Image (spheres, rainbow, N blue to C red):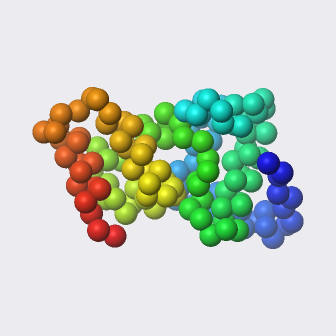
Amino acid sequence: MPFVRFNLSDKQFLDNYNEGDYFKIEEIKINFTPINENSPYIELTSDNQRLMFLYTRRWNNLLKQKPINTGLPDSKEEAKAIKKMIEEGESRQRIFSFFQRSESVLHDIIKKNLEGRLDEDDPYAQTVKRIFDQID
């Protein structure tokens, strides 16, 4: 994937967005291992390459008016952060707004956390059901 070259105003815009209130995997662990073993992120060898990959994807998402984290690799760290917000009782809208992923991707990440581990009457499973059932 080619990297976007930023001009000064683009860079300022992206810097402002990077300071926004949304999930940034690089603030948790820049050298995370993507869940998908075929992710191009795995081949990146330096923190600078990893940051440029993340920033470029986000910038392209902004240009295409998509949620900013669309197309970024899924990670266990992100799944844990989603789980924590659910356990803290955050609303569905807040979770979607913070993680900036499509509904289908977020639902998939949450379901992966639940697979084979919870019973129907488990409070965590009930919380997830409540979040899935909320109307925007």
Residue at 29%, 29% in the rendered image: 116
Residue 74 vertical placement versus 71 (above, below): above
Q: Quadrant of residue 47?
A: top right
Image x and y of residue 41, in percent: 70, 37
Give residue 81's position: percent from left, percent from top: 43, 42
Q: In front here: 102 or 12?
A: 102
Corner quadrant of residue 42: top right
Using residue 4 as the reference point, say whether residue 84 is left or right of it.
left
Q: Quadrant of the C terminus?
A: bottom left
Q: Is residue 77 left or right of residue 45?
A: left
- Relative side of 79 to 27, left or right: left
Would residue 113 be found to the left or right of residue 20 on screen?
left
Q: Residue 75, percent across and down?
A: 53, 36
Name the residue located 36 percent from the left edge and 36 percent from the top edge. Answer: 113
In this view of the protein, which residue sits in the foreground, 36 or 90?
Answer: 36
Q: Is there any visible trace of residue 27 in the rendered image?
A: no
Q: What percent of the width, then of the height, locates residue 71? A: 61, 51
